[in-house]
Amino acid sequence: MHAFDIEQLKTLVTVVDAGSLTAAAPRVFLSQSAVSEQMRKLEERVGQALLTRSKAGVLPTAAGT
């Protein structure tokens, strides 16, 4: 198995701390769409959802925690 991308992991932590992809974006100096793409790629690599998304924001799943 290949190593995880450290930037994707840092972005995941920032998204969870910020409570949304949009709020995390400026904190990691990326656009919201770039943050979303990083999370999609990380979830693809892990093989399961790491975030539960809703209009109110995001929460980590058990795997995301």
Image (cartoon, helix red, strand yellow):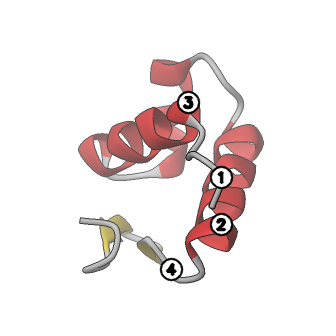
Separation of residues labelled 3 and 1 (CA atoms):
15 Å
C-beta proximity under 8 Å, tags 2 and 1: yes
Identify the residue at horizontal 55%, vertical 71% (top origin).
46
> Disc 4 marks which residue?
49
For mark 2, give the secondary structure. helix
- Eye-nearest disc, 2 or 3: 2
Identify the residue at horizontal 61%, vertical 58% (top origin).
42
Q: Which mark is residue 19?
A: none
Q: Is residue 51 left or right of residue 2?
A: left
Which kind of residue does numbered mark 1 sit on?
His
C-beta proximity under 8 Å, tags 2 and 3: no
> Disc 3 marks which residue?
7
Identify the residue at horizontal 36%, vertical 69% (top origin).
56
- Eye-nearest disc, 4 or 1: 1
Residue 23 visible in the current orientation:
no
Q: Quadrant of residue 35?
A: top right
Location of residue 58 in the rendering, given as x and y in whole percent from the top left corner = 38, 65
- As displayed, is residue 64 above or below residue 6? below
> Disc 1 marks which residue?
2
Q: Quadrant of residue 61?
A: bottom left
